[in-house]
Amino acid sequence: MTLEVSSPSASAPLTASTPACSHSPGGAYAGKSKWSPWVKKPLWAATDPHLVASVDGEAGAQTHLARHLTLFDLICIGVGATIGSGVFVLCGLVAHSYAGPATFLSWGIAGLAATLSGLCYAELAGRFPAAGSSYAYSFIALGELPAVLAGSCMTLEYVFSASAVARSWGDKVVEYSKANMDPDSNHPILNFLEPGGGVNPFAFIISTLAIGLHLRGVRESKGITNVFSLLKVSLVIFMTALSYSLFQPANMAPVVPQEFGIEGVFRGASTLFFGYIGYDEICCVAGEAINPSRNLPRAVIASLVTVTILYMVAAVALTGMVPYEDISETSPFPDGFRYRGVEWASHFSAIGELVTLPLVVLVSIMAQPRLQYAMAHDGLLPPIFAALDSKGNLWYGTLICGVVMIIIATFVPFTYLNDLISAGILIAFSMTDASVILLRHKSPENKPLYLEKLLGAFNVLAIISGILVSYCIDSLQGQCFAAAFGLLLVAVGFKLHKVCAHSPAESTPADKEGFKTPLVPLLPLIGIAVNWYLIAHLATFSLVLLAIYLVITFAIYFLYSAKHSVANTTGWTRHHQAVSNGEGAYELTTGHKIT
């Protein structure tokens, strides 16, 4: 199967017939003479070699993903994928169990962590506007095995979070039905809603409908995404405004309840980070964005600003309307209105949540087939994940990941998924932060890999510091150890900044006028430290699940991906050709045939 590959000046076919170690004048080879899990994809091979199409999508419709997503579409994807269970469910859980009136501070801390990584996403999305998001960035900066790890963590975000939200929606249907029916009546509808055994039929229904819509293609689903994103934002604004009209200042005192303390605020931030999952889906549909170098960074930043403001204002409204002890952990706003005797608002908000929450399921799963598409093109997944149907849709990949999502949503309760997903995404965010540093800095010439070693040490110290602050800060000995490792963390970060100079590395066309993350490496390093700190606050059971999940990921990599990897078999080769305007065209040869 031949794919057309566009460069700024010309295009050339992507073929499958170059030996692993071939070179051409002016060319480059990304692989090595022997297998290595650290082989990196070269910059020129990552500036959208697989995903180039005309804006209208007519040319090459059966081999390319068309660029048809506008800035407004991208913002709707970001906001639509982000706002959901965070404000509809977790806001109440954190207010009741972790932070009380200080829930808005938890949202702010989680938002800070998301923004630090979001700035890195904004730069890399504009610089490498191809499908894959953290997976693509990690492949360029960190290597193949880290890229697979990032892709695995992103699957937690896309498939598992879609499953979690579908399950949350199904639980809300059950709760709303019980609130309006006699739970002791043995009504057939209640028996259907709760058949027992942990099965949730409505989670199955909404998951199946979302996958069915995606099988029709993104063009059909993006209109629905835009409409429902606007409806969802309108619903949050309505609930917030009405809550402020019922605001009682006495409910906000004390802001940080003594029973929770500042530790509860940070624990709440770790849980609420789930509410920010989704904005990076913008990056995973980059291969379908119009004018990606400009629109992708704008969409990422606009989505983060929008949801952070909505979250913090809504949290203040909720905890001011209802005493935190009485806030529902599963349906905070509808139950809050009922608590204050405003029944019509309770019904309206509950129905509004049931109507708009499925959008998160729809948008969350949208990015997974694109991630699989990128990985399959690199030989790390079977070719079927990159196969397009006659309309240019990723039908087979969508069906496979959709079946997995439906099974998880139907049989696995929401509480088992929340912290697991947050942990995986925080790792992916840290890898994106590290990628910006590695692409913007370089090791000293007399110290190869010095930058990589410092960055690895920084991550290890950040993990240890997070654990010490989370679990040992109550004792004097724990405080001393936490302070010592904190100082080491700062010292390594300072050393990295002073010794590793800015890199004049190969640039991409988008680098000249694209968005740049400010204060590199300071902001990415702070982002990494905050991410690991939040991970340390998550439930131990979820971290054990994450460890098992990553072991399975490594097993898949060594049993399949390593044997079929483009980087470790045929590699990429660029052939420069003279053209009339003096610029070079190139041919990318991967040797990996997609059928």
Image (cartoon, helix red, strand yellow):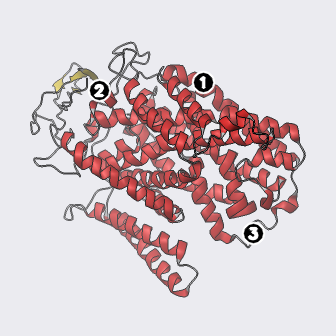
**In the rendered view, would you say 562 is above or below 361?**
below
* Residue 306 in sight from this viewpoint: no
Which amino acid lies under the numbered mark 3 shown in the image of this protein? Answer: Pro
* Residue 48 in sight from this viewpoint: yes
Residue at mark 2 to residue at mark 3: CA–CA distance: 58 Å
Residue at mark 1 to residue at mark 3: CA–CA distance: 42 Å
Residue at 25% across, 23% down? 595
Count of labels in the image: 3
Which amino acid lies under the numbered mark 1 shown in the image of this protein? Answer: Ile
Q: Residue furthest right?
A: 341
* Residue under pointer 2: 7
Which amino acid lies under the numbered mark 2 shown in the image of this protein? Answer: Ser
Residue at 28% across, 51% down? 555
Q: In the image, which disc is placed on residue 211?
A: none
* Residue under pointer 3: 257
Q: In terms of image quadrants, where is residue 476?
A: bottom right
**Element type at marker 3?**
loop
**In the rendered view, would you say 376 is above or below 139?**
above
Residue 402 drawn at (x, y percent): 46, 33
Crowdedness near tag 2: few (<14), some (14–19) or many (≥20) residues, C-alpha within 10 Å: some
* Residue under pointer 1: 224
Closer to the camera: disc 2 or disc 3?
3
* Left or right: where 437 falls relative to 109: left
Crowdedness near tag 1: few (<14), some (14–19) or many (≥20) residues, C-alpha within 10 Å: some
Q: Residue furthest front?
A: 186
